[in-house]
Amino acid sequence: GGGGGGGGGSESSSYFFFTANKDGSTVSRYSLDPSNAAVVTLGDYQNTAISGPTGLAATSNGNCLFIASEGNSTIESVKIDSTGELIHQQSYQPGFAPSDFAINSNDTSLYAYSRIEPKYAFYSVNAVDCLLEFKGQSSVNDQIAGMEVIESLTSVVISTDVNTMLFTIGSMGSLIPVSSVNTVGAAALMRRPSAEQIFVSIGVQTLAIFSVSTVSLNPIPGSPQSTNMISNMAFEKDGNYMYTAGTIQGSVSMRSVDAEGATTLISTIASGGTYPIAVAVDPTGKTLITANYQSNDVSTYLITHGGGGESAGISLVHNTSSGALPRDVVIVTK
């Protein structure tokens, strides 16, 4: 999914997370206590605009959720109220089957892309009313694995199953090709928060890491790294730790990330459910969540960073039922 809503949170903050359930054509809603990874199920959201949802994006103010439905080639925008209820705002037809999103951190631009056909559309965002304005559509040559916005460089990065490409953001959000690098077999792409670095999982057991400039993608020293299974990734807000899901292996891992972007494995454990396909970490860096595609549930894990006699690592706390085939998960703060 694109983005995670809300800031770092405080004692008075409320935390919610949502899953896009591909077979159930629903979005499951939950409240979360990050301090102990406790979850309360709030029920499923259904709307005629949702059919086969596969991707979610939230604005950083925690106000809006966008739902990508491959089944009916529709994007739905909803408001998130203070209790975690979802309120339909509008539906949009991008002209292809949208799979997921990339959203910039200041909530002004949204890119929807497809994993079925190599197309993407770009929208301006009204993060108060949760409305989108269509700005255009374009395509690349190969199947898209992921997309990230780097607003500090006025750039977008797209990974396909052949290469990873750098674009400059042009008029009305259009993308102008700048450079590309070979990343055959890319499975996932993630930007490191607060850094101009991107991480590309290649063939699920290799991690390519690039520093990004306005003109090029530059491999860091030691990249690519051999890793355990990585099908999807998430970072803590400060970017110093990353969490990965090994979908086929059924594993979840915690890695530290140094200033240059090199990662070191800290811990790997068995996932709480089968086929963990999406992963998210809450803004406080205390709870990790996986959406488990084949067991129709979500798992929450407590994160420890070490110190005070504790070892750094992750530990499974709960499994909670979701709708059928949860394909994505996103966490928001209110």
Image (cartoon, grey):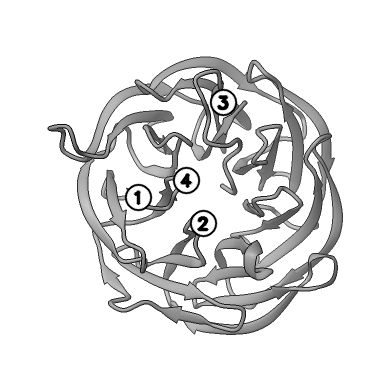
**Residue at screen point 86% across, 55% down:** 134
- Residue 326 vs 321, above or below: the answer is below
Residue furthest left in the image: 309
Residue 319: x %, y % from top left: 35, 23
User: What kind of element bears circle 1?
Assistant: strand
Q: Which residue corresponds to mark 3?
A: 28
Residue 23 appears in the rendering: no
Q: Quadrant of the C terminus?
A: top right
What distance separates the C-alpha of mark 2 from that of mark 1?
12 Å
Local SS, label 4: loop
Q: Earlier in the sequence, mark 3 or mark 1?
A: 3
Q: Earlier in the sequence, mark 3 or mark 2?
A: 3
Pick the residue in front: 48 or 260: 260
Q: Which residue is mark 2?
A: 194
Q: Which kind of residue does numbered mark 4 sit on?
A: Lys
Which residue is denoted by mark 1 in the rendering?
241
Q: In the rendered structure, are the residues bearing label 2 and label 4 in contact, judged by CB atoms less than 8 Å apart? A: yes
Decide: is 48 above or below 121: above
Upstream in the sequence, badge 2 or badge 1?
A: 2
Residue type at the position of mark 1: Tyr
Q: Which structural element holds mark 3?
A: strand
Q: Which mark is residue 237?
A: 4
| Mark closer to the chain start, 3 or 4 | 3
At a point 69% along the width and 55% down the height, the residue shown is 112
- Residue 44 x %, y %: 60, 21
> Looking at the rendered structure, which numbered label has been put on residue 42?
none
Q: State which quadrant residue 153 falls in.
A: bottom right
Between 120 and 33, the one nearer to me in the picture: 33
